[in-house]
Amino acid sequence: MDIAVARLEAWMRDYYHKVDHDIGSSGVRDLSMAEFRGLCGFELSELDPMMFHDSESYGGERLRAALADRWTGGDIDRMMVTHGSSEAIYLVMHLALEPGDEIIVLDPAYQQLHDIAAARGCRVTRWPLDPAAGFAADLSVLRELAASRPRMIVVNFPHNPTGVSITAAEQKEIVAIAAEAGAWLVWDHAFGELTYTAEPLPIPLGYERSIVFGTFSKSYGLAGLRVGWCVAPPELMARMALLRDYIALYVSPILEFFAEQAVRNADRIVALQREHAVRNRRLLVDWAAARPELVRLTPPDGGVTAFVEFPGQPDVVRSCRRLAERHRVLLVPGACFGDAYRDHARLGFGGTTAELTAGLTLLERVLREDAAGA
């Protein structure tokens, strides 16, 4: 292939469905249908009149309207429904960029946010988040990088995999930097609704060259829906619709029904998931603080992942494999986000408290065994 293997997805393909305890994923606890119906107050019988008919290229009108009410002040013309945010990323990277364009992307980053562009012949410039500074975003570095007038700046806060975020003032500065460069600002909002240290950031609607991705997978517990959304200028969305004619055409109206229920009841769903995540975040932070010789982490500002350093471990990838294959615990090695992070791992705390506790117990066992064997 002329595109790099998606390391994270390859790792998940090998282990995600073969473990008992998941402390590697980046989403909150999955909801059951019964829980989902209880939170949203609908009955499955409401599906009975539905015809198995095509949906629309931009998404069904009811779901687009619900999403627009939540995110764009009711402006449906800037909203597209997609197969997760991954389809939106693919479409945007093919249509907003040309070979030879420069994009600036956070480092570390979700691989799809840069390697699709790289495969198209774009130049990828990294905006590094410094582990020694707790992965804090240094906007002065971004400003220096953007002096070259890149075609696109790609960010996601709260950040995957570190969980760090920025202030509202810093968000405004990023928008200003993109505007000065005349660049597309791609804002991945996957974790945007789930925050702990500050109120959620708004999506940057005021900048005419902003593109925003969202998903029901991370903060809602509805990963299996595979539904996402994209806010973009109408002229770009029209081109996205033409390209998706060759890929997926539209999202199933059955999935759109459930997604509409979710977005109309999003505050209730996210509040429940946040309450659960707050408890697990405290458990993780306390666990790490009690084991400084094994684990170092910066408490995440949002999302349900931390990017954990394992000092003194000879081979974190090997440890993660052993954890999965011998103990049936999923942990994602930092190498999935780049070779510079081979001493890190993405640790997800969005699952049940029992799952997190069991996973951490087995992780400590493997880390101590591997450190002793070094």
Image: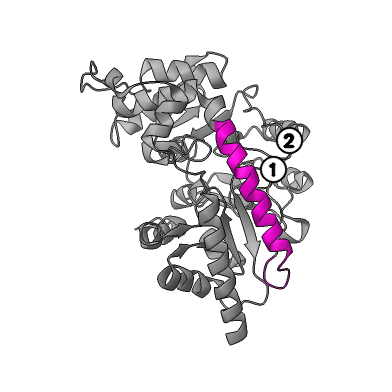
User: Local crowd at mark 2 within 10 Å, few (<14), some, or many (≥20)?
Assistant: few
325 sits to left or right of 367 = left
For disc 2, the marked residue is 198
Q: Answer with mark 1 or mark 2, whichever residue precedes in sequence.
A: 1
Residue with the most extreme bottom position: 373
Numbered disc in front, either 1 or 2: 2
Query: Is residue 78 visible to the viewer in this orientation of the structure?
Result: no
Q: CA distance from mark 1 to mark 2?
A: 9 Å
Q: Element under label 1?
A: loop
Give, as a three-letter code, the residue at label 1: Ser
Region of the chain picked out in magenta, as a range: 270-295
Image coords of residue 115 (percent x, y): 48, 52
Position above or below: 356 against 303 = below
Position above or below: 75 against 105 = above
Mark 1 and mark 2 residues within 8 Å of each other at the beta carbon: yes
Q: Nearer the viewer, residue 238 or 304?
A: 304
Quadrant location, the C terminus: bottom right
Give, as a three-letter code, the residue at label 2: Ala
Query: Is residue 350 visible to the viewer in this orientation of the structure?
Result: yes
User: Local crowd at mark 1 within 10 Å, few (<14), some, or many (≥20)?
Assistant: many
Image coords of residue 347 (percent x, y): 57, 57
Position above or below: 72 against 365 = above
Q: Nearer the viewer, residue 342 or 308?
A: 308
206 within the magenta span: no
Taking the spot 23% from the left edge, 15% from the top edge, the residue there is: 49
Q: Which mark is residue 193?
A: none
35 sits to left or right of 353 = left
Taking the spot 62% from the left edge, 35% from the top edge, the residue there is: 183
Q: Is most of the magenta stretch helix, strand or loop?
A: helix
For disc 1, the marked residue is 165
